[in-house]
Image (tube, rainbow, N blue to C red):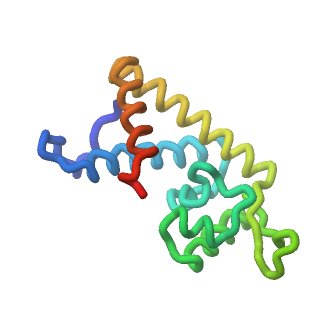
Amino acid sequence: MPAMPENSSPPNRDMLIGALLRVPAQAIHRRIVSELNAAGFDGLVLPHLAVLQFPGPDGARPGALADRAGMSKQAMNQLLGSLEALGYIVRSPAPDEGRARIVRFTRRGRAAYAKIHHILRGIEREWSAELGPRNFAQLKALLLRVWESPLIR
């Protein structure tokens, strides 16, 4: 695993679950953006992951994406405008829904989203090697159990 940033202290057994989940997630997000940029997906920055996170924006309304990301519709529309200007998404009228709009990936956006999946598979292989396949499988199983539980609703 990569070294911890200089400004962070070593973890201890008393750390709360929020930090234990947040710090690895932030490291994963930084790596995704770094590897996307290195692969030629220029202009993507950390905030764009609020749009590109699973299950992706394709076919969703901006308001639904804002809710999913826990941000205002105005902030989401700024991110969508940025991604649209970079050529990753387009916003178009929703069929039969008046002024409603939906988000669609462009070819470049689909390629970036596929690259994110590839990056995450690589991270999983590294974590499995570091933790051991059995421990990594247990970690994923426990996180999936939390995902499916009322704990996160």
Between 33 and 67, the one lying in front of the other is 67
Picture residue at 44% right of the left edge, 45% below the top: 147
Q: Residue 108, percent across and down?
A: 76, 49
Q: Is residue 151 visible?
A: yes
Q: Is residue 87 visible?
A: no
Q: How many numbered discs, if any? A: 0
Residue 13 sits in which quadrant?
A: top left
User: Is 2 situated above or below 107?
Assistant: above
In the displayed structure, does residue 83 sit left or right of residue 97? Answer: left
Between 68 and 75, the one lying in front of the other is 68
| Placement of the N terminus among the 4 image quadrants | top left
In the displayed structure, does residue 98 sit left or right of residue 70? Answer: right
Residue that sits furthest to the right in the current view: 96
| Placement of the C terminus among the 4 image quadrants | bottom left
Picture residue at 82% right of the left edge, 76% below the top: 97
Picture residue at 36% right of the left edge, 43% below the top: 24
Q: Residue 100, percent across and down?
A: 77, 76
Q: Residue 117, percent across and down?
A: 61, 38
Q: Residue 90, percent across and down?
A: 78, 64
In the displayed structure, does residue 22 sit left or right of residue 101? Answer: left
User: Is 55 situated above or below 132?
Assistant: below
Between 5 and 76, the one lying in front of the other is 76
Picture residue at 75% right of the left edge, 59% below the top: 59
